[in-house]
Amino acid sequence: MTNSTATFHEDPVRRGGLDVWAPSVMPQVTEKELTDEQRLAIAFRLLAREGFSENMAGHITWQRPGETDMLVNPWGLWWSEVGASDICVVDEDASVVSGRWDVTPAIHIHTELHRMREDARVVVHNHPYYVCVLAAIGKLPELVHQTGSMYLDDLVFVEEYGGEIDTPLLAQELAEQIGDAKVAVLANHGVIVTGADVTEATYRAASFERACKLAYDVMVSGFTPLQMPRGAMLGMKESLLERAAEVYWGGATRSLLRSEPEVLA
């Protein structure tokens, strides 16, 4: 037997997502319907498990369609300890409408992105380790694995570190630099991830830290990574967002609720 490497000379666009295949039945996430506050609290704990855990920092906002107010975590709690009853509500100008604690002025990062981007219903920001390694050396991750297809044409690097973003003006300038990118790596800082809903945003954020780790490990190996055909990546991107995101959310949520049921309280 000989070893060989198949070579693809053409790059046709592959179809993907629900247009190709949709499951007829899926396992239940939970036996009872979750509130929006419970879903957001679950997102915090899931992402804490995935490395979004520089625990003095970070926020997720959820501005539901047709609303200007948004759900957010309070200042002072680690993501790994946020529960549903801890979730606060702020208005579009970042003033606290309801909640037991205060909210960081860095929340303006979110208010301005929500204001500018109809597609950005959920905005995630934190400083996961491998994202920060690449942010420190001024690089976006090279997409070296099929899951990285999710980020094809959706990444931007904000090159200049400007310190704390704590005013609407600074946040507006940052939002303009991000443009319509779904994921922005901020130099010497961290990452901003957007999504149409909590499921999509959580999956995109969790997978991005893994993509950065893979890219870094390949980079330091000294080997040149194999290139994936763009046409295949386009189809894979659809499949990941339209099918895999829901499976990730379901499995990760069931696992979390078995070990940390108090997240719902």
Image (cartoon, helix red, strand yellow):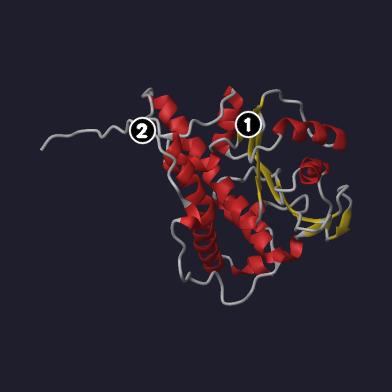
The residue that appears at 36% across and 24% down in the rendered structure is 223
Q: Amino acid at mark 2?
A: Glu
Which amino acid type is marked by label 1?
Val
Q: Position of residue 210 (x, y in %)?
A: 49, 42
Instruction: Report crowding for label 1: few under 14, some 14 to 19, many 20 or more residues within 10 A (C-alpha).
Output: some
- 118 vs 144: above or below: below
Residue 56 pos. (x, y %): 71, 43
Residue 10 image label: 2
Mark 2 → mark 1, Cα distance in angstroms: 28 Å
Pointer 2 or 1: first along the chain: 2
127 vs 235, left or right, is right
Q: Is residue 31 above or below residue 3?
A: below
Q: Quadrant of residue 10?
A: top left
> Disc 2 or disc 1, which is closer to the eye?
2
Q: Position of residue 104 (x, y in %)?
A: 81, 45
Q: Quadrant of residue 55?
A: top right
At 72% from the left and 25% from the top, the residue drawn is: 161
Q: Which residue is mark 1?
A: 156
